[in-house]
Each structure stands twice: as C-alpha cells, then as structure tokens.
Image (cartoon, helix red, strand yellow):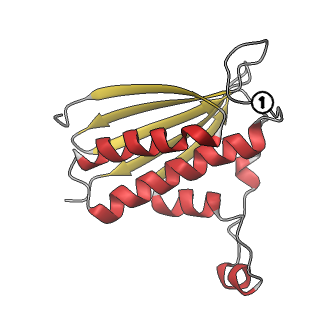
C-alpha cells in the first residue's frame, strides 16, 4: 500500500472482542507509512484506549455484540492517510462526554495509589499530535485523532 490519500472505514459492535481487529488494521496502516515503531505503538494504543472508553462508558446495554434490534451500539472508525499524517475519527451514538472538563491527573499520585484505570484520555492526548472531540446535533460523538509523520 502506498501512502497516497486513502480512506478506511470500520464499523464494529461496541464489544471488546473486536478491539484486536481495530488494533490490527491501525497498526498495519501505520506500518506502511513512515512512522517509527514508537509512533506506531502510540497510535495503536491511543485508538485502543478511545474505543475501550466508548465500550465502557458510551453505551449501557449488556448485549453489545449485534447490530440487530432497535439499538445501534456501534463504533465507527474512519481513517484517512496521506504522506504527512494519519487522521482517525472514532464515532458513536452513546452518551455525551464532557471532553473539555478533563483534567490531566497527577501521574505520580495515580501510581502511588496503585490505580490501574483512569489514564486513557491522558494517553490519547499525549500520544497523538491533535485530539478533538465534538458531539453533533443528531447525537453522534466523534473523537478526532491526528498523528504527523516526523521527518
């Protein structure tokens, strides 16, 4: 695959079972671009954390493995690439998140207290070059992630 402009679209049920597929696709794309191994790992982890947050917090249903029924508890991932960057939009129709009120945790205190959760947004914001969240009037949450290729 060349790094010319391109679009990949994935729609997965809101279920952790499908995170491996998402990681595989994102990693394969990043590996075919000019990213360092460190940046590939950062992109993969940021996308994994974002999708995990949707699964854990956006939807409340116990059964999240099907698109059938009245609910569309899905995660849509759109990836655009060009020779300079990868742009990843992660969308869902779950609960709204107050992204603007997120405060970076005290990492030292976090680890001293042996907390194993709560660093997802910290990872996303620190591993990607641009991170933006918006909720559309029709109730779609979209997290936009961008990582530039460092030359």
Residue at screen point 49% across, 56% down:
45
Residue at screen point 63% across, 43% down:
16
The residue tagged 1 is: 63
Q: Quadrant of the N terminus?
A: top left
Q: Position of residue 77 (x, y in %)?
A: 50, 31
Residue at screen point 74% across, 75% down:
115
Q: Position of residue 21 (x, y in %)?
A: 46, 38
Q: Is residue 13 above or below residue 98?
A: above
Classify residue 151 by image quadrant: bottom left
Q: Is residue 108 above or below residue 46?
A: below
Q: Is residue 145 above or below residue 77?
A: below
Instruction: Work out whether residue 97 can be spotted.
Output: no
**Horizontal placement of 146 versus 95: left or right?**
left
Q: Position of residue 37 (x, y in %)?
A: 29, 62
**Horizontal placement of 60 versus 90: left or right?**
right
**Horizontal placement of 64 versus 26: left or right?**
right
Q: Position of residue 102 (x, y in %)?
A: 73, 58
Q: Is residue 141 above or below residue 125?
A: above
As drawn, the residue found furthest toward the left would be: 2
Residue 35 vs residue 55, the one in the foreground: 55
Classify residue 80 by image quadrant: top left
Residue at screen point 37% across, 27% down:
8
Instruction: Work out whether residue 36 can be spotted.
Output: yes
Q: Secondary structure at mark 1?
A: loop
Number of marks in the rendered image: 1
């Amino acid at each position: 695959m060349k790094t010319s402009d391109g679009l990949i679209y994935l729609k997965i049920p809101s279920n952790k079972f499908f995170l491996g597929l998402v990681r595989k696709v994102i990693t394969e794309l990043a590996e075919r671009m000019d990213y360092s191994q460190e940046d590939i790992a950062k992109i993969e982890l940021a996308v994994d954390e974002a999708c995990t947050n949707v699964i854990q917090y956006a939807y409340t249903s116990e059964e999240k493995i099907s698109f059938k029924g009245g609910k569309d508890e899905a995660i849509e991932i759109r990836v655009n690439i060009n020779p300079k960057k990868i742009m990843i939009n992660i969308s869902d129709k779950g609960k709204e998140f107050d992204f603007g009120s997120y405060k970076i945790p005290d990492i030292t205190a976090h680890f001293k207290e042996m907390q194993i959760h709560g660093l997802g947004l910290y990872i996303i914001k620190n591993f990607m070059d641009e991170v933006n969240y918006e909720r559309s009037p029709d109730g779609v949450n979209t997290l936009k992630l961008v990582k530039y290729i460092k030359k």
